[in-house]
Every structure is written in structure tokens, then in C-alpha cells.
Image (tube, rainbow, N blue to C red):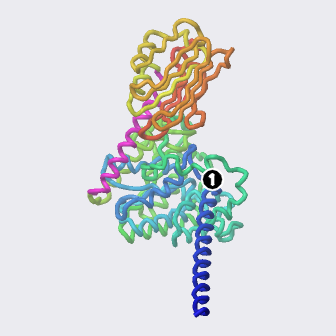
Amino acid sequence: MLSSKNGENVLIMKKKSFIATLIGIIGFLLVGFVVMDIVRQKWDYESDNAAQMIVEGYYKEPIDSLDVLFLGASTIRNGMSPLEIYEQYGITGYSRATSVQIPLISYYLMMETLKTQNLKAVVIDASSLSSLTDNSEKMEGKYHEAIDYMPLSEYKMAIIEKITKGSTYTKWDFLLPLYRYHDRWQQLDEYDFSYRNVNSDYCYKGQYPILRVEKYSFPEDYMQEEKIQDDEFYIEGDAREYYELMIEECKKRNIEFIMVKTPVGSWDMAKHDMVQNFADVEDVDFIDFNMPDIREEIEFNSETDYCDNGRHPNISGAMKMSRYVGNYIQSHVNMQNREGAVLGDWNESVKKYDCLKEDQRVLRESNLIKFLKKIDKDRYTVVIAARNDTTKFFTDEIRKAFADLGLSVDMKGASNQNYVAVFKGKKVVYEKQDAADEVTFSGEVGGIYISALSKADKATGNTASIMIDGVEKSVQEYGFNILVYDNYVGQVIARRAFDTGRTGKLYTTKD
């Protein structure tokens, strides 16, 4: 009997030991996953975690819900809007474009997509025909951006195997962030711990729409015959191979394969002819938005439709090109009608996208009176902080425009008056004007934490500050510094300074 009891006790102890060991292993793995997520390099755009959201967002799309797949580099990621195409033509799609995406990655992303989606068309950035596949030493970061957030699969493993072949990097560099980025500890900041909480509700179907407008002028000899802008473009062997694989697969499945090139000043007729010849040989379509007739047809304007130095289209440039591509697809492809839950999700996403388009019209406005009228919306939280003098050219018209927003500011009288105002819709949260002492505000409004400061006089510091969640957002120029936050979209949509004081100009602005 005693021996039997001892045996039972030993068995119980072994079970407890096994359970404790198992819990320890699970705990170790969980901690390991958390640590890996913290130390991994964050591939974000414009200080948000869109790179992660775009990749992860694709895997949330329902099976057989997409008509079109967009592939290629950042010019497609910024310049093609699946939501614009859906809004105009009822065609659904997702952009899996990433920075400097090579055809090898495009191919496996397409094959992965075809496993769950019955595509009708694939649209790809034609400039990737010149991309190399054996360039991991230089392009490692771009590869990580494309694949780090992919779940483990045969397609992810195939990409990793191909890009690490003959490289100093190993498969583990791409499979285990802790292995690759173990030395990032000293570089970690608050964002590494909180990045997953930034704009987690992503709805733009793979596009990264940018509101910013940066004027650009095409070269005088742009797209003229026999003028070469640069000689760096050529159709590279590996790129051709993966293009041919994609085209073959699309033809086998009766999928329209469409190559596009967004407008860029470094493009020329020689590059166009090179890609067009390839497209003709492969019997696929090529839409080149650099061609004068197409640019004129869509009314692409280099002064309003770029967000940087003539490379990436902003939201208005993307809208124009997307409408053209959507119309082309509708004319060449037999599309099916989408119904039910899929449409409900897309219709809700379109609402937010349309708000962004409206937001850009606010951003573009340079007249103070018109600007103040455009920011009179319930979904906007607005912060104003004065710097230096705002008195000299402060007119009754300006005072009335502020009053229409519920504000009582009147800068007539003493110069260099300190002033801060915060309002959401018609509700004024805070407003104070003081000729002597600095004015400050701190508090949560509409789900964001705002800190504002006005030291308008040199004696008090002559500065203005507007911080959102601890990050400086004001342009800190002379005059009324105004920040507009769209609560529905979840981002700052305008940062302006209107100088009604020292310059002698009634309205001056800075983005």
C-alpha cells in the first residue's frame, strides 16, 4: 500500500513538473514574441505604422472579394487608389505595392493572392522591370518592409530563400527579428513600444494616400524624342523572368495583366519604347502616364498632383490616374457585381477616403478667410497659437471670420499679443488672449492630447508651439499658427501660418 501511494505521489509530481515546464516554455515563447516585436525595425511612412497596416490589412480581406491586385513600388502604393476605382466603377482591389518592390516579390505576392482571390486584373508598376533580385545588401530594408508582416507561408519562405541565396544575410535574418535586430536596444524609443496603437484602423485598401502638395516642373525636354533623362533604366534578366512568370500565370487564368508607369521627370521616350516593346512581345497592356496625350486627358498637373519632387503622386494625382485605370479595366474586363457584406465594408471605407479628398482642399487653401470657413466642420479639432505680432493687418473681416467659428479674438490694440484657441466643431474648448503673459493650454480633446503655447513677444520668448500627443506639429512661423486635426480620419490634415502682422502681407502660408 505504501509503495502504491509513493508511486502515485511520484506520478503527480511528474505531472506537476511537466505542467510547470510547459507553462515556462509557453511563457518564454510569449515573452520572446513580444521582445521580437519591440526590437524589429519599424517600416513606417510619415511617422505612422502604415507599412505594417497595409501588409496586415490584406489578410483581413474576405476570400474571393477582390477583383484587382496592384503590385510594384511606392509610386503605385501612393499613386493608385483602390477606393477611387471602387467609388467610380464598383471594382474592388487591394494594393500590395511596397517601396522599391522587385518582381520576385511581386510574383510571390501575386501567387499568394491567387490562392484566395479570383482576380480579374493585375496592375503592376512597369519601372520594376529594371529591378535586380540579387541586391539584398543594398535593399535589405525594402525587403523587410515587404515581408516582415507576412504570416509564415510557402510564399514567404520562397521569397526569403531567393533573396538570401548568395547573400551575407541568412534566412534567420528575415524569420526572426530578434536575431537580425538584437543590437537595436540602444536605439529603442517610445514608438517601438506603442507603434501598434497608431492609426490601427486602416481602411485604404493598400494605398498610402498623401495630402501634401509640392510644386514640381517637368524638365523642358521631358518626353521629347531622342532625349535621354538618364541611362540607369534597362530591362534586367531576373526582372524579365519574373514578369514572364506573372504574365504566363495571368494568361492561364484569363486575368488581364496591365503595366503602368506613373509620371516622373526622369522618364523619357527611350524608356517608354523599351517597356512598350516588351509589352508588345508579351501581348499585354501598357499605360504610360508620362505620355503627353494621356497626361493631358487626365489633367495631371505637376504643380498640384505631387507630394514630393516630381516622384510620388499625392491624393489628387492618384485620383486622376486611378479613374483612368478603373475605366480601362471596366472597358476591357468582364466584371461581376459585388453584394452584401463586402460592399458594406467598402462603402464605409469610401466615406473616410472622401473625407481625405475634402481635407486636401483645406490644405490647399491659402486665403485666411476662406481657410477659416473650410475648417468649420464638426469632425475637425483646430488649435491656434499666435507668434510675434498679429495686429498690424488684423482686419474686421478677419475678426468676423474668427467670430463665425465662435471665437472672440480681436487683435486690434497692443501688438505682439499672446493667443491660444482650441475648438472642435462649433464648440470652443479654450480661448485666451493676453497682452502681457504667455498663454498655454493642455488637455485631451476628441481623443488626442493637445499642448499649445503662445509667447508672442520677444520679451517672453517669441515662439508658438502646438503639440499633439507629445509631438510638435506647429510650423512655428510668425502670425497665427493653425493646426487642423480630422477626428474621423485620425490625422493632422493641415499645418499653416497666416501672418497678419509684420510682413505687410495679409495672407502668407506655410505647409
Q: Residue at x 51, y 29 (%)?
A: 483
Q: Residue at x 52, y 56 (%)?
A: 274
Q: Position of residue 367 (x, y in %)?
A: 46, 21
Along the viewing direction, whichever of 155 and 244 lies nearer the viewer: 155
- The prevailing secondary structure element of the residues shown in magenta is helix
- Secondary element type, mark 1: loop
Label 1 crowd (10 A; few <14 / some 14-19 / many >=20): few
Classify residue 169 as left or right of residue 12: right
Q: Which residues are magenta?
A: 338-367
- The relative height of residue 165 versus residue 337 in the rendered view (above or below) is below
Q: State yes or no: residue 346 in magenta.
A: yes
Q: Residue at x 53, y 31 (%)?
A: 443
Classify residue 97 as left or right of residue 336: right
Along the viewing direction, whichever of 505 and 499 lies nearer the viewer: 499
Total number of numbered discs in the rendering? 1
Q: State yes or no: residue 41 in magenta.
A: no
Residue 221 visible in rendering: no
Q: Quadrant of the N terminus?
A: bottom right
- The relative height of residue 23 versus residue 181 in the rendered view (above or below) is below
Q: Position of residue 383 (x, y in %)?
A: 51, 27
Q: Residue at x 61, y 12 (%)?
A: 436
Along the viewing direction, whichever of 6 and 176 lies nearer the viewer: 6
Looking at this view, name the residue that lies furthest to the front: 1
Q: Position of residue 425 (x, y in %)?
A: 40, 28
- Residue marked by disc 1: 232
Disc 1 residue type (three-letter)? Glu
Residue 354 visible in rendering: yes
Q: Quadrant of the C terminus?
A: top right
Q: Position of residue 300 (x, y in %)?
A: 44, 39
